[in-house]
Image (tube, helix red, strand yellow):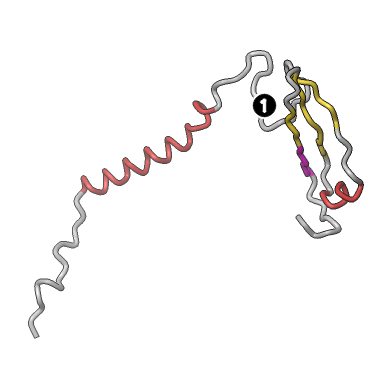
Amino acid sequence: MPVSSALAPQSTHTRPTTVLGIAAVLSLAILSLWSFPSFWYSKTDSLQGYFWLAEQNPMTDWHYVELPLSQAAEAVLAADKILNGEFENDRREVVRVFSAKRYSDQESEFYMF
């Protein structure tokens, strides 16, 4: 039975320019992902320096008031550090904040984490 030309592969050789082009594109993608933090996180306050998702209570023109958290909520969270409160400025605008962080790998009694 003769082999049809429509079903036979055209060429088993890959062009070197195609391989080099794909390698160049992938290399640029990896390089851009690797260098992304260096230009994204380049803006900072000269007095504070760099910080990474850290709670900051003293803020200019805002007053922080800590709000209590119930013991039941603290037990459920089983966090090592909890911040719960609100910021208020002179115009009576209020921003409520909450943060719970776990630094240890202990198991919660509620098996949440």
Residue at the extreme bottom of the image, as rendered = 1
For the point 83% across and 55% down, the residue is: 108
Residue at the extreme front of the image, as rendered = 91
Residue 12 lies, in percent from the top left, at: 19, 62
Relative vertical location of residue 32 with respect to residue 7 in this rendering, above or below: above
| Quadrant in which the N terminus is drawn | bottom left
Was residue 102 drawn as part of the magenta stretch in this picture? yes
Residue 97 position by quadrant: top right
Magenta-drawn segment: 98-103
Residue 5 position by quadrant: bottom left
Residue at the extreme top of the image, as rendered = 47
In front here: 75 or 11?
Answer: 75
Relative vertical location of residue 110 with respect to residue 28 in this rendering, above or below: below
Residue with the mark numbered 1:
51
Residue 61 position by quadrant: top right
Is 61 left or right of 26, judged from the image as shown?
A: right
Residue 20 lies, in percent from the top left, at: 26, 44
Amino acid at dot 1: Phe
